[in-house]
């Protein structure tokens, strides 16, 4: 439990410093009837560090190279780490886009190439792709009444 609390603090600090802020900003959340996406990624047990390195050291900091509109995608997206392994030994990580920005680019491959160019972006994407234990699964949901 203590590790999870530290992880949350780390994520908030990392996300805020990636955009030049010194303290975490208040988080917007979807209002009733707005769309939210939850995307899950199964990660191989022995590739968790590789996956987390890609997300937290390459992908998230790279957002500073994007346009202000594309940076907003990152500010409205949360990254969740698994609390335990799945029955098959993999670990499921999640991205929660809350609220969803209609028409925005959320594609990890596309955004990584925009950040680092095609050649370097493809090299970084090998870290991401090589860590996955299977296909990603996405859920499009609507915020219910409070």
Image (tube, rainbow, N blue to C red):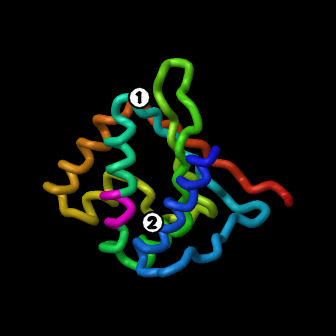
Residue 85, image x and y in percent?
53, 28
Up the image or down, 114 lies above or below 39; here it is: below
Query: Residue 68 occupies which quadrant of the picture?
Result: bottom left
Query: Residue 107 occupies which quadrant of the picture?
Result: bottom left
Q: Which mark is residue 45?
A: 1
Q: Which mark is residue 14?
A: 2
Asked if residue 122 is among those painted magenta in the image, a careful observer would answer: no
Residue shown at 43%/31% (left/top)? 135
Q: In the depicted view, which residue is nearer to us: 14 or 88?
A: 14
Tell me where the magenta segment starts and ends, as one range. 57-62
In the displayed structure image, the side of residue 17 where residue 83 appears, left or right:
right
Q: Secondary structure at mark 1?
A: helix
Find the residue positioned furthest to the front.
2
Residue 127, image x and y in percent?
27, 43
Circles 2 and 1 in contact, beta carbons < 8 Å: no
Residue shown at 26%/47% (left/top)? 125
Find the residue positioned furthest to the right.
146
């Amino acid at each position: 439990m203590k590790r999870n609390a530290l992880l949350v603090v780390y994520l908030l600090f990392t996300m805020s410093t990636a955009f030049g802020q010194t303290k975490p900003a208040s988080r917007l959340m979807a209002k009733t009837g707005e769309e939210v996406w939850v995307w899950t990624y199964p990660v191989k047990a022995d590739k968790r560090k590789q996956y987390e390195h890609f997300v937290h050291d390459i992908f998230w900091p790279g957002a500073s190279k994007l346009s202000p509109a594309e940076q907003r995608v990152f500010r409205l997206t949360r990254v969740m780490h698994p609390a335990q392994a799945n029955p098959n030994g993999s670990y499921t990580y999640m991205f929660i886009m809350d609220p969803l920005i209609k028409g925005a680019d959320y594609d990890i491959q596309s955004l990584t190439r925009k950040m680092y160019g095609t050649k370097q972006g493809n090299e970084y994407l090998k870290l991401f792709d090589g860590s996955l234990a299977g296909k990603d699964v996405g859920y499009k949901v609507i915020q219910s009444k409070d």
